[in-house]
Amino acid sequence: MTFVMDQTKLSRSGVDFIDEDFLHGLLERRTDSAEVRDIIAKSMAKQPLTVEETAALLAADTPELIEPIFEAARQLKRDVYGNRIVLFAPLYIGNDCTNDCHYCAFRRSNRAAVRRTLDNDEIRQQVLALENKGHKRLILVFGEHPRYDAKFMADCVRHVYTISEGHGEIRRVNLNAAPLDHEGYRTVKAAGIGTYQIFQETYHHETYRRMHPANTRKGNYLWRLDGVARAMEAECDDVGIGALFGLYDWRFETLSLVSHALHLQKHYNVGPHTISFPRMRPAQGVEIDERYLVNDEQLKRLVAVLRLAVPYTGLILTAREPPEVRREILAFGVSQIDAGSRIELGGYTEAGDSQCMEREQFQLGDIRSLDQVMRELLIDGYIPSFCTACYRLGRTGEQFMEFAIPGFIQNLCTPNALSTLMEYLIDYATPETRAAGEEAVRRELTKLPDSPRKTQLLERLRRIREEDERDLYF
Ligand code: SAM
Ligand code: SF4
């Protein structure tokens, strides 16, 4: 059986905008240092790049051409985004799945997978475990199955927001799940979701067809490609896109991600909130075709080019990557990472220290604790942040892009990052991490110029320390 799509349910921008001949043509082009320099100058002025300009940066393949791109990405990150890194954790709710994606251990033909859907009590145990580590932002992850419909997901989201013990609470719940119709998005939006993430996996049609059999829901390329546009039309204006790197040519996928971002920008006046670039990981019973695997150097290049191409968009680097790779790639403009992640169903209370392939979707590369990751970030000069202020104050969409408001980062992001960091240090950090964190807060405060906002921030930090107040945000 092939799933027939009801064309009337697509978004108003619902066409297949991935023009493969055009993109493949762009991958043939060459570039030189003058062109690379001009394009970099445009990015540094915070102008999004065209697909053609992105292709020119991807064509840079000698150290003389690549190094300036790396340096510009580092500089854009430092000067424009500051040194905040937002932390979150994934929570797998259920791995029943009617799809058969070749790369995923949850595919329906994998009979060895242990299937499970957490009930409300189990969700509660997982969320409490996460809160007790210090997490404030979660992404709930679901397989694609009729039982995980929009109402089910919305109920899970509402339930998570009610779970609280001591100072523990989840302040933002994002979703990574199958594409919905407009009504479905309205249902999950009403439950108070943050970002709705859908990865296209591969934008290359033939590869998509091979990876996602036609007799599955996910087999419909256009329904998935159009997924986040429908979300935007249904008032979920905070969406995340991504590609699973390793299925097809990494440069093609990078150009496609930029095309997708520009498509959303053109039709909805706002691009995606985030882009993810997961790399293929070993998974139970999955034979990986090695032809398109992306090595560390290529990953660095694609992240640096994305940073320059879409200066307004957050970049997410997940714990699929090993610690050393994460440490290096962070500098290229990543804005969010997960930490202390477990992706086995029930993994936050049941998994112990090792991974169990029968129970997880793929193998993680970084299973360090949140505290260990926090400490490394602090020592490396970052400010780990659990801030959720923008979404809770309705600062989403076009007019609230960080760049649109002068002083946004200095007046809002940095103070909120420091107060959420201070909460973490007091409530959850080990003594070593707390010492590194106190030092980082001092360092950042000396960098902030005197202003009424700084005075307010100092007063809030005092209230957090001395009066046990929490959740103070600008
Ligand atoms: N089932 C939903 C879907 O497919 O959209 C939810 C997402 S799935 C549980 C999360 C993401 O994990 C997928 O979109 C895919 O990009 C990624 N993934 C699947 N198998 C993977 C693997 N072997 N290695 C790395 N990432 C993988
Ligand atoms: Fe199911 Fe998602 Fe895995 Fe595909 S990637 S098999 S849809 S869980």
Image: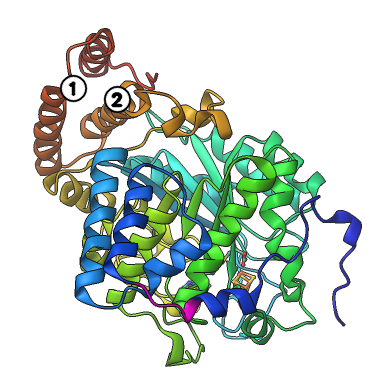
The residues colored magenta run 27-31
Height in image: 61 above or below 380?
A: below
Label 1 secondary element: loop
> Is 264 contained in the magenta span?
no
Q: Main secondary structure of the magenta part?
A: loop
The x and y percentages for residue 97 are: 68, 71
Height in image: 235 above or below 289?
A: above
The type of residue carrying mark 2 is Gln
Q: Is residue 288 left or right of residue 394?
A: left
Dot 2 corresponds to which residue?
410
**Which colour assignment does the render follow?**
rainbow
Height in image: 231 above or below 391?
A: below
Q: Is mark 2 within 8 Å of ligand 1?
A: no
Count neighbours of disc 2 (C-alpha within 10 A) and say few if under 14, some if 14 to 19, many if 20 or more.
Answer: some
Residue 448's disc is: 1
For the point 36% across and 73% down, the residue is 31
Q: Is mark 1 within 8 Å of ligand 1?
A: no
Name the quadrant where ligand 1 sits.
bottom right
